Amino acid sequence: MDVMPITLTEKAAKHIQQQLEKRGRGLALRVGIKKSGCSGFSYIFDYADEIKPDDQLFESHRTKIVVDISSLPYLDGSRIDFTQDGLNSSFKFINPNIDNTCGCGDSFSVKESAKI
């Protein structure tokens, strides 16, 4: 399978680097999906302390991103941004594989072409 990289905006990369420094450990941002919500899937964000054999590693703005191979088709070609509005901050996915999102915005469905 040809894989398009997962990329970060400069703001997202800077925030991740700051969080890893505060944490004092971690190699990368771990991104994945899980079955959840009314539309089918939701994103998983965590920090990776190790790279597993079934992980795909990307780098964007000197920041490493780890994706497990089962999540990769659903995240292929995605871009991650970081937004801040007053005291509220969050990561925002720009995912070309999304078909629909639920009303609350917590879950999404994917295009048929992204399904395994």
Image (cartoon, rainbow, N blue to C red):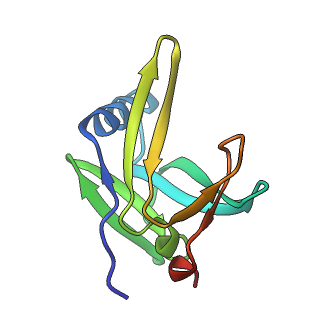
Considering every residue shown, the one lying at the far right of the view is 38
Q: Quadrant of the C terminus?
A: bottom right
Considering every residue shown, the one lying at the far left of the view is 61
Whole-percent x and y of residue 38? 79, 55
Residue at (41%, 61%) from the top-left corner?
Answer: 66
Q: Quadrant of residue 112?
A: bottom right
Q: Nearer the viewer, residue 28 or 40?
A: 40
Q: Nearer the viewer, residue 87 or 27?
A: 87
Residue at (40%, 34%) from the top-left corner?
Answer: 82
Q: Quadrant of residue 55?
A: bottom left
Q: Nearer the viewer, residue 69 or 97?
A: 97
Is 80 left, or right, of 62 in this rendering? right
Q: Is residue 104 above or below residue 107?
A: above
Q: Is residue 11 above or below residue 112?
A: above
Q: Quadrant of the N terminus?
A: bottom left
Q: Is residue 46 above or below residue 21?
A: below
